[in-house]
Amino acid sequence: MDSLHAFNAFMRAAEARSFTVAGRQLGVSSSAIGKAIARLEERVGVRLMHRSTRAITLTAEGARFLERCRRIFSEIEAAELELAQTQGTPRGKLRVSLPLAGMLMMPTLTAFMQAHPAIALDLDFTDRLVDVVEEGFDVVVRAGAVSDSRLMMRVLGSFRLGLVASPRYLAQRGTPRTPADLAGHACLHHRYATSGKLEPWPLRRGPGEPDIPVAAVANTIEPLIAMAEAGLGIACLPDFAIRRQLADGRLCAVLAEHTEHEGTFRLLWPSSRYMSPKLRVFVDFMARHLFAQ
């Protein structure tokens, strides 16, 4: 058991490149992690890590040992979870990170909670690019490209950004026919919460065209939907957030032939972990229901 504890301390520190993060994950001090790894190195007679005040790097032997530790703990988790699955109902806390726009996924998340009441969702809404492994999330929802080799991935579905306005607004102000026509309209913009920059509108525009005016700005999607429905202007919104409004006529597409955009939502989770029953049912449920029509 002492060996397994040392192997686990080494694996966590190697993956996080930090004794402090590994200690936080295991509920011990960073010095305890360092001592456990030092005893492990003394026992096997090989240096596994190079330490400095700035970073931890693996030796060649340490990199090989990390892969073996991952396999060992994957098999242990698999054995435990096979036993847990015999009990039937997936249960436990599931830490999930979602973008701020993920608030619009609440109907699907609510349906999941109703279908799996033994799973307690711990939801963190942020547009900050969280470190899934270091911050201890079980799974995250992200839009855009993914390049982290430590993560497994499943595509949830695609979405498009498009310009919309209410019929009342268009009756009062007219319908723009070209991107240049937006210069005479009230335009409602989304500001990225992390950078403070306005999200670009995905318009095919010619050189020298005037800037898109700014009538209002919000750093979440919901106020822009409400303002557009109230007839206050034209907004650029993701289609998954306004399907009902487009279907019942509260909002109408504008300049659809001049817009070009496609994004993808993905679920990501640490690849070093065996897929627990609670994670498996969450991934399957979200993939099946989030973009279902």
Image (spheres, rainbow, N blue to C red):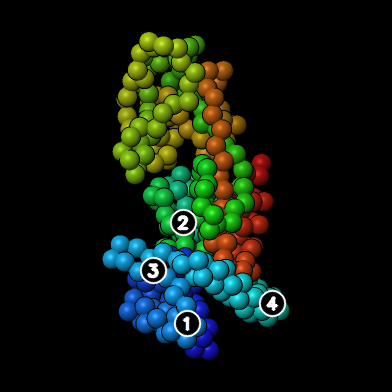
Label 1's element? Answer: loop
Residue picked out by circle 1: 45
Q: Amino acid at mark 2?
A: Ser
State which tag comes first along the sequence, 4 or 3.
3
Which residue is depicted at the point 34% across and 44% down?
Answer: 194
Label 3's element? Answer: strand
Residue picked out by circle 3: 50
Which residue is depicted at the point 37% across and 10% down?
Answer: 208
Q: Amino acid at mark 1?
A: Gly
Alpha-carbon span between mark 4 and mark 3? 37 Å
Can residue 95 be seen from the camera position used here? Answer: no
Q: Amino acid at mark 4?
A: Glu
Q: Quadrant of residue 77?
A: bottom right
Residue picked out by circle 2: 97
Foreground pick, 121 / 246: 121
State which tag comes first along the sequence, 2 or 3.
3
